[in-house]
Amino acid sequence: MRADIRKFIAAYGKPGRPSEIRQEPLDGNPGHYARLLALEEGALPAVGDFGEYANDIAYMEKVQPELFAFLLPICLDVWRHDLMHNHRSDYAGWVEVFISALARRPLLEDCLTEARAEAVMAFMREGLLDRIDREDSLSHAGEHATAHAWFYRLGSFAVTFPALESLWRVWWRFETPGQAIAALQYASCLMYDDNANPIFAPRTAKHGGGPPGLWETDGQIFHESWKLENVVFFVDNVTPDYLRDALTRAAQALEGVVESDVPAQMISDFERQRPLLAHRLRALPEIVSIPLNATLEWPPLP
């Protein structure tokens, strides 16, 4: 496990407890502050207490910096817990509020030192890699397809931090089977029409599902876009030839590990699907450079 909260606190520095609480609560009731401050180290907070604080930092005009710095390790532990449970934990809806606060407000810049902000970014990157490592299937159907969890978390990460390259370089080395599987999942969303994806069964009116949109997030992120550095990295590095090589490496990494015809099928389909792939590789940087609530589907192939 990469994202260990104890290792994070060692890098972050044990935060000092605020001497007073000046944070205004959104609902007018400050009781959750005392309960959050009284948590034993390593304990997860009550769902309601976490949710109330997520609302405070997302919607109140002012955020108390020293309280935010103290409670952030607790919030990040909840964030990781929810991700590893595929957004099905009791915290799920409130984690979306927390993520939206980080994405649309300069909380890390305003409330933390540069070193602490870097530690937060590293923890969230490592947590996402932990989740990618767990991928074990090249077949998903229905609205509860577990792979969607890491796709949406990746989208939120790309909005919040200018650090997609540092995550991507580790992920696409395929040091674990999960990394290779996740790469094939991602590439399939670029290579195939939504109703012909060999990994994600088509969406149905009854069961939902379908492949995830590569611009989607798991937070209430409506008016933000990817950080420019992430767009530039994607444009400069993720090309058809890059993906063709990656498919071969992923298939090799999964040989004898995963029983599936999908890796061979994607390699066999590659040249036939190249026009659509090239089109989507041009379209995605344009999509993620505008507010993310503006896009619901891929633009059609000319």
Image (cartoon, rainbow, N blue to C red):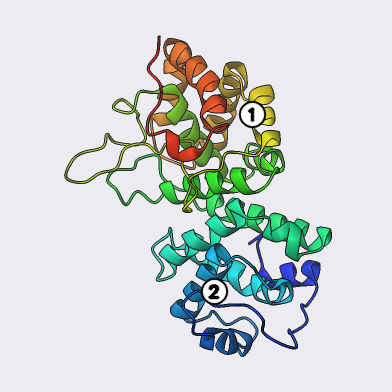
Q: Position of residue 200 (x, y in %)?
A: 34, 36
Callout in the foreground (1, 2):
2
Considering the numbered disc 2 on the image, is that residue within a helix, a strand or a loop? helix
Q: CA distance from mark 1 to mark 2?
A: 34 Å
Task: Classify 31 as above or below 127.
Answer: below
Residue assigned mark 1: 234
Total marks drawn? Answer: 2
Q: Nearer the viewer, residue 196 or 288?
A: 288
Relative to residue 32, is residue 155 depicted above or below? above
Mark before the other along the chain sequence, 1 or 2: 2
Quarter of the picture containing the N terminus is bottom right
Q: Are marks 1 and 2 in contact (CB under 8 Å)?
A: no
Image quadrant holding the C terminus, namely: top left
| Dot 2 amino acid type | Tyr
Q: Examine the rendered structure and indicate whether residue 299 appears above or below residue 112.
A: above
Relative to 291, 200 lies left or right? left
At a point 50% along the width and 74% down the height, the residue shown is 26
